Image (tube, helix red, strand yellow):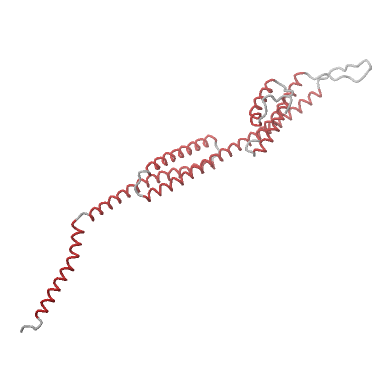
Amino acid sequence: MTPLNQPERRTRLWQFVLLYLLALLVPLGASYYLFSNNSLADENARLKKELDITHQEQNRLVTQFDTLSRYLQRIDKVDQRLREEKNDLVLGRLTTSNQDYLNDIAVSLSQLRIDSARLQVQAHRLLVRDELRDFDLFRSNRSTIDALRQQLSKSGDQTQSNARLAEELVQAKQHIIMLEAALNRGPAVAPVASSGGGNPVPPPASAGTKLQIALLQDQLAFANADCIRQRADGKSRKERKRLLQESRTAFIKILQDPATEDLKQSIEKTLEPINVELGRPARFFGLL
């Protein structure tokens, strides 16, 4: 039996086939366009190259950062020994070692700064920039620490010097007292009566003894003035000027009647930097 709507069925069949072919043509064409060129392969190669570059830069940066970390660890160990060590010779060697490590860090940072200009990964450039900024801050702090450590060492030396000067002052005072007592006693000499039968005249002191007493007194005054001058180190500007002026006054007082020419020259040499700092003229005799 032949269906009554056979023409319509045939028309519908051809319409379905045509629509199916059109629908199939779109994905087939897209697939052909995607897989017929090398865009995916090129993209894959590019990503692989970027990954290799990233790994190489990371390995190089890790090596440089590890080197810097080792220097920091060595500096930390040296700092611990510097806080505990008392021997001046060992302290000098440790300070030299610390300075060598800081110089090595400076060289490594310089190389890192040069290498950062050739980095291709933006994240790596930012990381290196932050690292360089941190190490610049570290070096600035280290400079401050070294300056404070030197100032502390200088203050310790000044304290020892002041203690030594104080001890010498005490000894000089005792020596002066002994010489004055010996001068007052003097050798026993027969009294010489005056024409009016007055008291006996004591014998005059020897010139050598008087010179020795005057020299000790000048040395004592010089030590006091020099102690005042040393106390001015590390003080504020106003306090330092006051102490230097006080020291200068004491020195000039000795120069009015120095015991020896060598002492005079020593005082004049000591006064030269004080006069320059205070803005005083070189010739200071007469007026202070």
**Image position of 7 (left or right of 264):** left
139 vs 213, left or right, is left
Q: Nearer the viewer, residue 67 or 159?
A: 67
Q: Quadrant of the C terminus?
A: top right
Q: Residue at x 67, y 22 (%)?
A: 265
209 versus 227 height, above or below: above
> Furthest-left residue in view?
1
Residue 31, percent across and down? Answer: 19, 61
Residue visible at 55% across and 35% down in the picture: 88
Query: Residue 287 appears in which quarter of the rendering?
Result: top right
Residue 37 coordinates in the image, percent (x, y)? 19, 55
In the displayed structure, would residue 272 be above or below residue 29? above
On screen, residue 56 versus residue 262, left or right, reads left
| Residue 36 percent location from the top left of the image | 18, 57
Above or below 249: residue 151: below
Residue nearer the viewer, 123 or 179: 123
Q: From the viewer's perspective, is 187 left or right of 96?
A: right
> Residue 5's image quarter?
bottom left
Residue lying farthest to the right in this orientation: 196
Quadrant where the N terminus sits is bottom left
Q: Quadrant of residue 166?
A: top right
- The percent coordinates of residue 254 (x first, y second) are 72, 26
Q: Residue furthest top?
A: 195
Please tell me which residue is depicted at 66% across the width and 29% down the height of the picture.
275
